[in-house]
Image: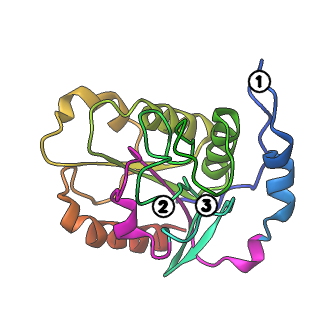
Amino acid sequence: MLKPNEKAGVAAPANTRRPQATSIIRIAENREISKFLGPRIFIAGKIRRYCFRHDLVRGLRSGWDGKVALQCDGFTYVGPFMDACDHGCRHGPGSHGVLGVAGLGCEGVEETRSSVFQRNEFGIRTADLVVAYIDAPDCYGTIFELGYAARAGIPYVVLFAPGIDISDFWYLQQSQAKFRAPYVVPRKKLPAVFADILVQLGAAQ
């Protein structure tokens, strides 16, 4: 049976300096968990403009202002967060949807790679479940996040977009939570599958 996880802070990775303005200590102190209802879900996967998360998380486009949680219908979204910049200033290669591109400065919350890592690590550790949607084979950050979740004892489930060679991801599937979910899910069917996963999670808790 899946049980709610302990809420925990996260130490900074070795050999990195924690940005003062976005420290995990500050984030944790400002987050009042009592304001949020439903299971805490971290949705892993490639971040790009108009990505699949917008189909699952209502209000995500306007949700980014340094938040670490967003109340949704039936669950609490705990990351990752990105900047909904329509002209792509923060959606270049390796930007994780928040890191600015030189010469295209948008107004908004300034982030560094270190603070993005800390924020996502914090989101995973406070999650009741990680749901990953793999729609690109070069999802290196997603693979790391799933490994981190497994190491931290956070259950996860992996879904794949059509066209992905699932055989390359057999290792990830060995320790995923045993939900009744199809491996291959077209994006248009993802909301229904995600809703069913939430129902199964609620029944297991």
- Horizontal arrangement in the rendering, residue 61 relative to residue 36 (left or right): left
Location of mark 3 (residue): 3
Where does residue 151 sit, x and y in percent of width and height?
Answer: 59, 34
Location of mark 1 (residue): 16
Whole-angstrom CA distance, mark 3 to mark 1, is: 33 Å
- Horizontal arrangement in the rendering, residue 97 relative to residue 163 (left or right): right
Front label number (3 vs 2): 2
SS assignment at label 3: loop
User: Farthest residue in the left direction?
Assistant: 163
Whole-angstrom CA distance, mark 2 to mark 1, is: 27 Å
- How did the renderer colour the structure? rainbow
* Nearer-the-camera pick, 65 or 53: 65
Location of mark 2 (residue): 84
Three-letter code for the amino acid on which mark 3 is drawn: Lys
First along the sequence among labels 2 and 1: 1
Three-letter code for the amino acid on which mark 2 is drawn: Ala
State the extent of the magenta-drawn residues as a range.
33-59
**Contact between labelled residues 2 and 3, with CB atoms less than 8 Å apart:** no
Q: Is residue 16 above or below residue 129?
A: above
**Contact between labelled residues 1 and 3, with CB atoms less than 8 Å apart:** no
First along the sequence among labels 3 and 2: 3
Q: Quadrant of residue 121?
A: top right
SS assignment at label 1: loop
